[in-house]
Image (tube, rainbow, N blue to C red):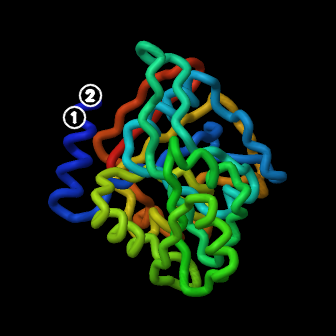
């Protein structure tokens, strides 16, 4: 299964020059990824989180937005509790979309550069002072063209593709998910569904922004598979 995944990712990159994009999210059965106050640890169980770390260890790069950095301060490394011979898991390139370069040089994602590299994709609006600060921490900063004031996700894919990044895992929030899906840049989705219901229109949904006005506009998955991990369901499909 792993070999077939990797071949598909590489084939996509070889034919398009772009990374194969996977969108991953953990949520309740009604599609909520956080409460109205932003609480999300932990919606899914430990087996689902370990499965997500396994997926993270397979891809070439993982991307989040600066909002996730400022709110959650993640390390964004692959951490596997069960690995053969206690070998360290493969670490993907950690990518942050940060149009104004708000990522603090003290953020966890700026640390451990000897173990996992970090690239911050920003725009010409970034402060030179802030750029020097994160670069001193060993982080690479790349200016990408902007779209509506934000880093262009499609331009980022081209940059990563040229660097030989064959697969990219989106672990952002609802805004990034909506943007990538709206621009039709996602190839595959992996959704971890906890057997819980949150409710409330003010709770954070997996896909932000406005919803479609007609059913004909909804995104439909192909080659859908469903499996269990612990008490949670994993639903996968192609777009």
Q: Position of residue 96 (x, y in %)?
A: 56, 61
Q: In this view, does 139 lie to the left or right of 38?
A: left
Q: Is residue 201 left or right of residue 232?
A: right
Left or right: residue 17 compared with residue 142: left
**Seen from this angle, which residue lies furthest front?**
136
Marks 1 and 2 close (CB-CB < 8 Å): yes
| Residue at point 49%, 78% (across, down) | 143
Q: Residues within 10 Å of mark 1 (few under 14, many from 20)?
A: few
Q: In this view, does 123 lie above or below 82?
A: below
Q: What element carries label 2?
A: loop
Vertical order, 121 against 7 (above or below): below
Residue that appears at 46% across and 64% down: 180
- Which secondary structure, mark 1? helix
Q: Residue 36 carries which label?
A: none
Q: Residue at x 21, y 54 (%)?
A: 12
Locate residue 18 relative to residue 24 in the image: left or right.
left
Name the residue tied to disc 2.
1
Q: Quadrant of the C terminus?
A: bottom left
- Foreground of the two, 159 or 49: 159
**Residue 235 spot, x, y in % from top left:** 45, 36
Residue 216 sits in quarter? bottom left
Residue at point 63%, 73% (across, down): 132
Q: Position of residue 184 (x, y in %)?
A: 38, 66
Residue 157 at x, y = what percent? 37, 66
- Say which residue label 1 marks: 4
């Amino acid at each position: 299964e792993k070999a077939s995944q990797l071949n598909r990712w590489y084939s996509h990159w070889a034919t398009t020059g772009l990374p194969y994009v996977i969108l991953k999210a953990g949520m309740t059965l009604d599609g909520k990824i956080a409460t109205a106050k932003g609480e999300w640890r932990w919606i899914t169980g430990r087996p689902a989180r370990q499965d997500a770390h396994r997926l993270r260890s397979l891809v070439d790069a993982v991307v989040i937005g600066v909002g996730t950095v400022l709110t959650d301060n993640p390390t964004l490394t692959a951490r596997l509790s069960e690995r053969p011979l206690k070998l360290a898991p493969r670490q993907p390139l950690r990518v942050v979309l940060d149009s104004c370069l708000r990522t603090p040089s003290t953020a966890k994602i700026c640390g451990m550069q000897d173990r996992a590299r970090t690239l911050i994709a920003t725009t010409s609006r970034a402060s030179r002072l802030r750029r020097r600060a994160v670069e001193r921490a060993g982080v690479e900063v790349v200016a990408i063209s902007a779209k509506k004031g934000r880093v262009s996700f499609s331009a980022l894919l081209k940059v990563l593709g040229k660097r030989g990044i064959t697969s990219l895992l989106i672990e952002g929030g609802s805004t990034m998910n909506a943007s990538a899906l709206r621009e039709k840049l996602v190839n595959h989705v992996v959704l971890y569904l906890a057997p819980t219901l949150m409710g409330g229109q003010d709770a954070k949904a997996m896909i932000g922004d406005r919803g479609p006005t007609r059913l004909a506009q909804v995104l439909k998955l192909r080659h859908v598979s469903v499996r269990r991990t612990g008490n949670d369901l994993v639903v996968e499909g192609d777009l």
